[in-house]
């Protein structure tokens, strides 16, 4: 008789709810993840919650402790809610929390899938689910978010400020390769690269050059190139012509908000901040912000948080459980259990209860 006992895999997750509705939706996602692990079996989560938030910053003067980034390296993954609060300038909150985490943990890819979930609809007329199924691959470490630049004569009429975008060969090559692999893995094998290389004649031109060089390694991927302004029009007027999209840190941030709105609501959209080398934990968060206007009211849409949780489960190697969670989400939306932004009347708890029931079914 075998003496080997089946053991659960235990995933250590650092949970950072952050600000506003980040707290509401993280609580909901943790509940759903625990329900998933209990129901599916074979793996468990050990969550540790970090109160790294704007409220804490206002009380004690810091978001993360000095060894915060080192602490995070001990976890298998990071689950993040949202950052931003009216009493703290947004550039302080972002540069004290989310951006240092992405940079220090080598999370140079941000994957943002968008599609129309069952039982929901796009604001575009005649746009069926098969017409809008995109993955936006966002460069997550450099470019417009390099943080380089400075100010002088700040409080005079001669104030000067520079914001320097830094693009590197290494940084561009690695995001392009990731995007080509993503496009190759999808049925339509199409990749659209977005820049503004007519007006920005250095970094953006380097993006164009490296895109075409790497394209030679992927003859089976159909490619095209768009300027970011024209891309917004194409997303609205011809969504079916797009599949995988790769763009810079800022452009992809903007395009993914538009993509989410076109798929039904920004409340459903997930994101994965990945270190593809897997030497550091990756971080999963809905793309929406902290929405101070509805924070604490229990009405935020938790679907983006659940979809992000499913992406985390997939990244941790539990593919079947991730598929099960996505099925549960869509069974629920198909049955009409939706928050106000999706045209429904349910609150965060009711949607969370419904997903847990679907998982257990
Ligand atoms: N959950 C995402 C979040 O809190 N977003 C706030 C934000 O503005 N993030 C900027 C970014 O993702 O670059």
Image (cartoon, rainbow, N blue to C red):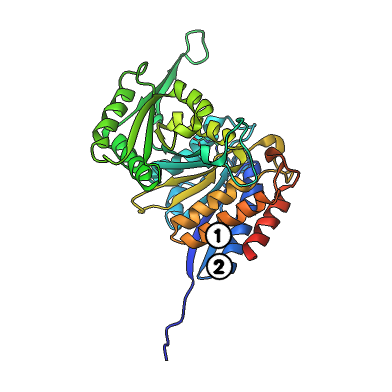
Foreground disc of the pair 1, 2: 1
Query: Is the N terminus in the top left, top right, bottom left or bottom right quadrant?
Result: bottom left
Q: Name the spot of residue 147 as percent of width and height, x first.
A: 41, 30
Left or right: residue 144 compared with residue 52:
left
Decide: marks 1, 2 in contact (CB < 8 A)? yes
Query: Is the C terminus in the top left, top right, bottom left or bottom right quadrant?
Result: bottom right
Secondary structure of the residue carrying tag 1 is helix
Secondary structure of the residue carrying tag 2 is helix
| Classed neighbour count for the residue bearing mark 2: other residues with Cα under 10 Å, few (<14), some (14–19), many (≥20) | some
Q: Name the spot of residue 108 as percent of width and height, x first.
A: 38, 41
Q: Name the spot of residue 43 as percent of width and height, x first.
A: 50, 67
Q: Is residue 244 above or below residue 3?
A: above
Residue 40 image label: 2
Closest to the observer, 277 or 135: 135
Who's the residue at 47% across and 75% down the image? 7
Who's the residue at 30% across and 21% down the image? 202
**Residue 63, quarter of the rendered image:** top right
| Classed neighbour count for the residue bearing mark 1: other residues with Cα under 10 Å, few (<14), some (14–19), many (≥20) | some
Q: Is residue 9 visible?
A: yes
Residue 288 image label: none
Q: Is residue 222 above or below residue 331?
A: above
Extreme residue toward the front, this view? 126
Residue pointed to by mark 1? 324
Q: How far is the residue under mark 1 from the one under mark 2?
A: 9 Å
Who's the residue at 70% across and 44% down the image? 339
């Amino acid at each position: 008789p075998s003496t080997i006992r089946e053991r659960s895999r235990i995933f250590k997750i650092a949970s950072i709810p952050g600000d506003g509705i980040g707290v509401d939706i993280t609580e909901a996602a943790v509940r759903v993840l625990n329900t998933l692990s209990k129901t599916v079996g074979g793996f468990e989560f050990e969550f540790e919650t970090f109160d790294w938030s704007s409220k804490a910053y206002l009380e004690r003067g810091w978001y993360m402790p000095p060894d915060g980034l080192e602490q995070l390296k001990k976890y298998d993954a990071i689950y993040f809610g949202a950052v931003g609060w009216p009493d703290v300038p947004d550039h302080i909150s972002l540069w004290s929390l989310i951006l240092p985490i992405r940079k220090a943990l080598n999370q140079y890819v941000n994957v943002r899938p968008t599609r129309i979930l069952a039982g929901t609809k796009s604001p575009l007329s005649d746009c069926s689910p098969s017409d809008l199924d995109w993955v936006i691959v966002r460069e997550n470490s450099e470019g417009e978010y390099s943080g380089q630049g400075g100010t002088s004569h700040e409080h005079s009429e001669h104030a000067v400020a520079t914001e320097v975008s830094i693009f590197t060969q290494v940084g561009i090559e690695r995001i392009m390769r990731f995007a080509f692999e993503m496009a190759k893995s999808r049925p339509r094998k199409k990749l659209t690269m977005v820049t503004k290389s007519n007006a920005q004649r250095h970094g953006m031109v380097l993006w164009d050059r490296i895109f075409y060089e790497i394209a030679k390694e992927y003859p089976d991927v159909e490619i095209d190139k768009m300027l970011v302004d024209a891309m917004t029009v194409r997303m609205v007027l011809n969504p079916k012509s797009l599949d995988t999209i790769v763009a810079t840190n800022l452009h992809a941030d903007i395009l993914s908000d538009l993509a989410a709105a076109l798929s039904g609501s920004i409340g459903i959209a997930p994101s994965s901040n990945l270190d593809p080398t897997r030497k550091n934990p990756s971080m999963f968060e809905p793309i929406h912000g902290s929405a101070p206007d509805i924070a604490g009211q229990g009405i935020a849409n938790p679907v983006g948080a659940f979809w992000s949780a499913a992406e985390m489960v997939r990244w941790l190697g539990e593919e079947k459980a991730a598929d099960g969670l996505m099925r549960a989400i869509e069974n629920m939306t198909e049955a009409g259990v939706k928050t106000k932004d999706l045209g429904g009347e349910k609150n965060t708890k009711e949607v969370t209860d419904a997903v847990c029931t679907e998982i257990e079914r």
